[in-house]
Amino acid sequence: MRDVTSILLVGVGGQGTILASKILTIGLMEQGYDVKMSEVHGMSQRGGSVSTQVRFGEKVYSPIIGAGMADILVSFEEMEAARYAKFLKPAGKMVVNTTQIPSLPILSGACEYPARIIDELKKHVSVQVVDATQIAAGLGNPKGANIVLLGALVGALGLTEIDWKEIIAKTVKPAFADVNIKAFDAGLAAV
Amino acid sequence: MKKLLTGDEAVARGLYESGVSFASAYPGTPSTEILENTAQYDEIYAEWAPNEKVAVEAAIGASMSGVRSFAAMKMVGLNVAADAMFTFSYLQINGGFVFVSADDPGMHSSQDEQDNRHYAKAMKIAMFEPSDSQECLEMTKEAYHVSETYGVPVMLRMTTRICHSKSLVTEGPRQDVPPVPYVKQREKMDAVPAISKQRRYVMEEREQKLKAYAETSPFNAEEMHDTKIGIVAAGAAYMYARDVLGDRASYLKLGFTYPLPLQKIRDFAAKVDTLYVVEELDPFMEDQIHGAGIACHGRDVIPGIDELNPNIVAAAILQQQRQGVTIPDTYVVPRPPALCAGCPHRGFFYALGKRKDTVMVGDIGCYALGGSEPLNAKDLAVCMGSAFSVGHGLSHGFQMSGQKKRVVACMGDSTFFHTGINSLTDVAYNHSNTICVILDNRITGMTGHQQNPGTGYTLKGEPTTLIDIQTVVRALGIQHIRTVNPLDLQAMNEALDWAYAREDEPSVIITRWPCILKKFSPADQAEFDLSMQPCVVHTETCIGCRKCLTTGCPALRFNTQTKKSEIVASDCTGCTLCLQVCPVQAISRKGDK
């Protein structure tokens, strides 16, 4: 367990956590690590919160983590960072995208989206804020926030020895390779 | 080269490598992707069956014909298929027969948390439990070997974390397996009392042989380190224990778990100071180990409810509590799943939710979400295909006990074909006044868009006979049938009024509109207006009454600053339900006047 790194990617259904974690796991595998990835399908995809767990190291046993086991939490949405914070080690790192997606009780006006979430997170843990959605939009690729966040995650973990551009190029459709590599570089530069 | 595969993908690969010829299933999370991936191999005939019992029966027939066959289901599916399986356990195996039961501890996507390992014992069959994707592949291959060597159906018991976790897999070549020529052997294959009585002895003998196999199976192995703690575990539970305890414990890792290798467990127990059985859900292994007079801990320290994880094991065995980062609850608002923007079910639930003295019976599928706020249109649900028969019983009970309630029951198109036809037969045959609604969205929705007998396509994407729901309903003897577009609220309400007026007779409403997320077939495009022009709110007209928000559409939001509703253009599919609900015509479709 000592040499295993645990990553938790969280967000809202449709934000592209699955593609980001797919690229991540392929890169780690090709680097020679043992890798496990776990996600939940089905009911939880209907606009609910989604989470993907990626663990890598010399030998990985459990595909999942419990509370206080993640070394890094990448949240594609602000409130989801707070929801899943309990899975993060107290000395762990958080990468948070400054995007707010209201859930149904908020849409209907039953309650408000919590204010100043990132300020609160910073009181408890090391937080790296990334304007991934805006960065992606600035690159003319509003759906590319997931790859910006992948770049930020790679930067935060110092996994720069892996040739991520090649992995991205062979994982996504050729027409999208360049925009995704740009998004990845922007994310890497943001941390 | 290694590949990262889910357990489901690895089982499919295992079927390919085992030379399997025939595979059948009904979709169900977390097992669905097994057949979806099996269908990618041209060498395997793979099909969706209308339900799990049919899938198992078809696979039994294929096995009897002499080829290797397979069926897959989620755990509740085995309840449906159990009738066939219990008896098949008595019969001769020709081609190897293996099936997957995919259990869902923690109920990520299920209505109950049953532990299907009990079925292996009750059916007196053999069981493997893989703990990662490589084992999913290898145990699938070994399962066929065991099935044919011992003449036994084999259960490959998986759980959500095994089905949906990815890990590294080394693939191998396909083994060509010659078919076993069919020979009439009535004394081995005709389940009638005189023959089954003889077969009981064969089963008992088989179980003794399987006990011997369990003791020598390469999948049941000791892993000795420090001997103060000894762990007996299988499947995901082994991975959690191994992760937490590392070399501080010794392990007896079990992959073949019914019948259990009790001698091996006894020998292992003698080598360690304290023995723990780490297992998820029921004390299936623990009870047998206790029964054999071997002292062990299990359910006394590990809870039997919900999914296990490494932390639970750490707390139980090492008394270690792991703490994460704590953020006050005030920073988190729930994010419940909801019907998608443009979901045709929304129109039905919106119309029905307004009706008084109505008891609404739901079923298993996306429409389970019709019970949530703000639609709040459902009272109860039980299991696949049950809505109409449960509704029938409720309706009779209400009448006999003088409670003035009208029962409306609904299920989807795929669920209707699954077991809803039986349920509607009861309604028709026994003159129920239950209003039965078939929510026909032209696909199996919740599990991720699988074809079904009503869509006109097979699992492999080939055109096939389309079974028309209205024709089936009429053939069952239902006289009163209406088909409506549920997103046309006036038509939906008229259809409900029409059905409510039939107080002494059964009536069926078919709501027909495609799931907005499905890949539309040429027939869908010809039948439905799928232009999907989004709707817009005219803020100068909007009075901020929030009526549109009562549809629960995730594309709508209330701006608390301006006190007006807004529509997110990129999420809106132009279903127009909000437009129809608005009392002041403040919403229109883009492009319309």
Image (cartoon, coloured by chain):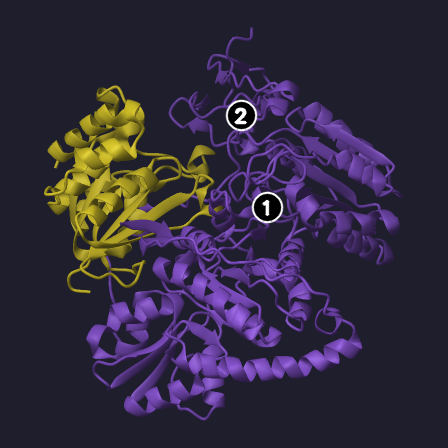
What amino acid type should be assigned to the residue bearing mark 1?
Answer: Glu
Name the spot of residue A164 as percent of width and height, x first. Answer: 18, 37
**Residue highlighted by disc 2:** B545
> Element under label 2?
loop
Q: Nearer the viewer, residue A24 or B222?
A: B222
Chain the render paints purple? B
Q: Residue at x 32, y 38 (%)?
A: A19
Tell me whether marks 2 and 1 sit on the same chain. Answer: yes
Q: Does B507 sit above or below residue B110? A: above
Q: Quadrant of the C terminus of chain A?
A: top left
Give the image quarter of residue B480. top right
Q: Quadrant of the N terminus of chain A?
A: bottom left
Q: Nearer the viewer, residue B216 or B275?
A: B216
The tag on residue B531 is none
Q: Residue at x 47, y 70 (%)?
A: B281
Q: Is residue A13 left or right of residue A171?
A: right
Asked whether residue B327 is in view, the answer is no
- Determine the residue located farthest toward the top in the rendered image: B593
Name the spot of residue B479 as percent of width and height, x first. Answer: 87, 37
What amino acid type should be assigned to the residue bearing mark 2?
Answer: Cys
The tag on residue B47 is 1
> Element under label 1?
strand
Asked whether residue B261 is in view, the answer is yes
- Closer to the N terminus: mark 2 or mark 1? 1
Q: Is residue B361 left or right of residue B271?
A: right
| Colour applied to chain A | yellow
Crowdedness of circle 1 by 10 Å Cα count: few (<14), some, many (20+)? Answer: many
